[in-house]
Amino acid sequence: MRYPELVPSKDDKRVLSFCASICPGVRPFYIPVEPQDGCLLARCFPNVEEIVRLRGGKLIQGWDISQIPKIQFEATWHAVWQPSRRIFLGVSPQESGQSHILFLPDVHRAYDGSLVPSRKFSLGDRELVERYWVLSDEINRIRLDLWSAGMGETHPVWRQRLGGLFAEIYSLKERLQNDT
């Protein structure tokens, strides 16, 4: 796994409290990630739907619980594949190449094709973390705009539009993570 620090401990009391605020009475568990042929990044629901169509099993929806140490826990709406009763598998590639995720099943929400906002929990100085969140949201909005306009990450506009934001967010991240 390239970034083991992105997957928090399933036994951390702060993680359990965060998860309880999302799905009371449900405990998160680890799921291996084995990207399948044809599965695309950030397309977990269509990916799992296609795997279920081809191979059977069930789509299980819930939250991918991740962390940025000393900054935040984040819950991202996610789908995994359940090929048999006791087996769960992440079939979608992870942006940072994790070999497993911490998954929190959610039977109370139904996927309807619309974007579900992630949920976040601050682990650091609240004011600095909130600025980090604003920058992160702005970077993601601009990235989506550029991708939608057909501009790949090597297009010069990326550096023009995102360079300053990335510099500020990296500076904030370093400041938060070096604070003890």
Image: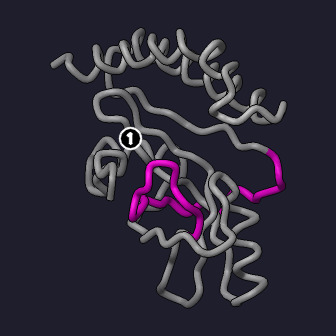
Q: Quadrant of the N terminus?
A: bottom left
Residue at horizontal 69 percent and vertical 89 percent from the top: 55
Q: Amino acid at mark 1?
A: Gln
Q: Within 10 Å of the Cα at label 1, are there few (<14), some (14-19), or many (20+) other Cα atoms?
A: many
Magenta region: 91-114
The residue sitting at 70% across, 19% down in the picture is 157
At which x and y percent is residue 51? 70, 79
Whether 23 is among the magenta residues is: no
Residue 36, x across and y down, in percent: 59, 74
In the rendered structure, the answer to whether residue 158 lies left or right of residue 20 reads: right
Name the residue: 54% across, 14% down: 163
Is residue 106 rendered magenta in the image? yes
Coordinates of residue 161 in the picture (x, y in percent): 66, 14
Residue shown at 64% from the left, 33% from the top: 153
Q: Quadrant of the C terminus?
A: top left
In this figure, what is the number of numbered marks?
A: 1
Spot occupied by residue 29 in the image (x, y as percentages of width and height): 40, 65
Q: Is 53 displayed left or right of 106 in the figure?
A: right
Relative height, residue 2 to residue 89 (above, below) = above
